[in-house]
Image (cartoon, rainbow, N blue to C red):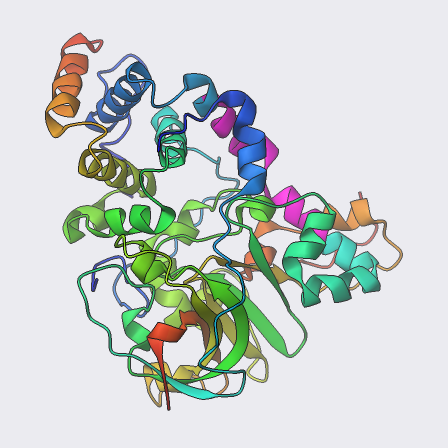
Amino acid sequence: MRRLLRAADVGQVLLKGGPARLPDDVVPRFKPGDRVVARNINSTGHTRLPRYARGKRGVVDRDYGVFVFADASAMGRGKQPQHLYSVRFAARELWGPEASARDVVFIDLWDDHLDPA
Amino acid sequence: MNGIHDMGGMHGLGPIDREENEPVFHHAWERRAFALNMAAGFLGEWNIDMSRYAREQMPPAEYLATSYYEHWLWGLERLLVEKGLLTRAEIEARVAELRRLAPR
Amino acid sequence: MSDHHDHAEEGSPLTETELRVRALESLLVEKGLVDPAALDALIDTYETKVGPRNGAHVVARAWADPAYKVRLLEDGSKAIAELGYMGRQGEDMVVLENTPKVHNMIVCTLCSCYPWPVLGLPPVWYKSAPYRSRAVLDPRGVLRELGVEVPEDVEVRVWDSTSEVRYLVLPERPRGTEGWSEAELAGIVTRDSMIGVAKVPAPARGGRR
């Protein structure tokens, strides 16, 4: 499917964007407040689960709703709609006891990136 | 993939070099590289996730030694060839031709 | 910096990178796959039309109008769209409020994800290895390096933009701006304050514009 982008359409195309949000008819595996652990995924394909978070425990802070799952979409495996969450990780959980006792890192992770902790 | 792009937590990558009042684009070629990526993406042969994955496959030493829009250029070439819009041969032939014609 | 081989001085031979960009553009145009006028329109949009002044407008509105601020924090995309800012790389916006007790900071460790409709294209330092690697690891060190000292009793929250959700920091309103108009307020909001690596400084006495 080839669509040539014309100058006259640029404004409209940019304003429309490319939303990744999908209809909300998928059951979430988690809810805010749930303790989760990021999966230890190490495939050679695309993933948006950074290495520094794998195997680390966090708490679901927010459910953003259903989105295209980037890991699948990048590999031509379709949208695989699923819930996307903001997950809160303590700095000490990520970086060890020398890290700040107070600070946190929030990472956007999908259902397929997480297991219950 | 466990590539060089996955940088969170790495040490040794240097001080943060912030340029005051930096321009949006530093060179004319950057403008074209940016726009080509956007326009070619609009063709619908790949999605944004595929375009990120393409860049992630740049050899690590090259990734660290080149600038942001050079990553975009590398990724774009890879996608265009992978999706069959251009061939590696015709890209190299055109580069060679332009090199011959370039001002000295 | 690595730009010694990617651009040429006026009148000197084209660099390899310049040749490759020209090669791709000429081939794609010849094959009818890209329209050169569209390329110019894309460049013009991000070079002149979309930039941090958009985000400054949002921040100023939130400072001046408490009801807008509530809407902004509740549904960032919708409230930002009220001001006409929307679209590519900003389809799903979440706004994070900085307070005396919480300092938010945004990064994309994996690439360079950034809220284009409100901040334009990201600066080089945001997309580069030093920031991407250290923002999640040592945010206080990064902030100190960039001129911000965060007290021990303030919680630093770093947001790694790993999805298509895009974040914007609502910086604290500085003292000395009471009664300012929205336009005056927008004039002091900096891009770096909306990324969360700077505070908006209190104006010098009589320093309103």
**Residue at 33% from the left image edge and 67% from the top image edge:** B8
Tell me: residue C194, above or below residue A38. Answer: above
Is-magenta flag for residue B9? no
C127 left or right, relative to B59: right
User: In which quadrant of the rendered view does residue B91 lie?
Assistant: top left
- Residue extending farthest to the front is A25
Which of the two residues, A77 or A101, is positioned nearer the viewer here? A77
**Residue at 33% from the left image edge and 38% from the top image edge:** B69
Tell me: residue C207, above or below residue A6. Answer: below
A15 left or right, relative to B88: right
User: Picture coordinates of residue C144 (x, y %)?
Assistant: 48, 67
Which of the two residues, A23 or A8, is positioned nearer the viewer here? A23
Q: Is residue B2 visible?
A: yes
Which of the two residues, C203 or A58, is positioned nearer the viewer here? A58
Q: Is residue C204 visible?
A: no
Is-magenta flag for residue C50? yes
Tell me: residue A102, above or below residue A85. Answer: below
Location of the N terminus of chain B (image quadrant):
bottom left
**Residue at 22% from the left image edge and 9% from the top image edge:** B103
User: Picture coordinates of residue B56 (x, y %)?
Assistant: 24, 52
User: Picture coordinates of residue B72 (x, y %)?
Assistant: 31, 40
The segment highlighted magenta reads C40-58
User: Picture coordinates of residue C52 (x, y %)?
Assistant: 60, 45
Location of the C terminus of chain B (image quadrant):
top left
User: In which quadrant of the rendered view does residue C69 lie?
Assistant: bottom right
Q: Main secondary structure of the magenta part?
A: helix
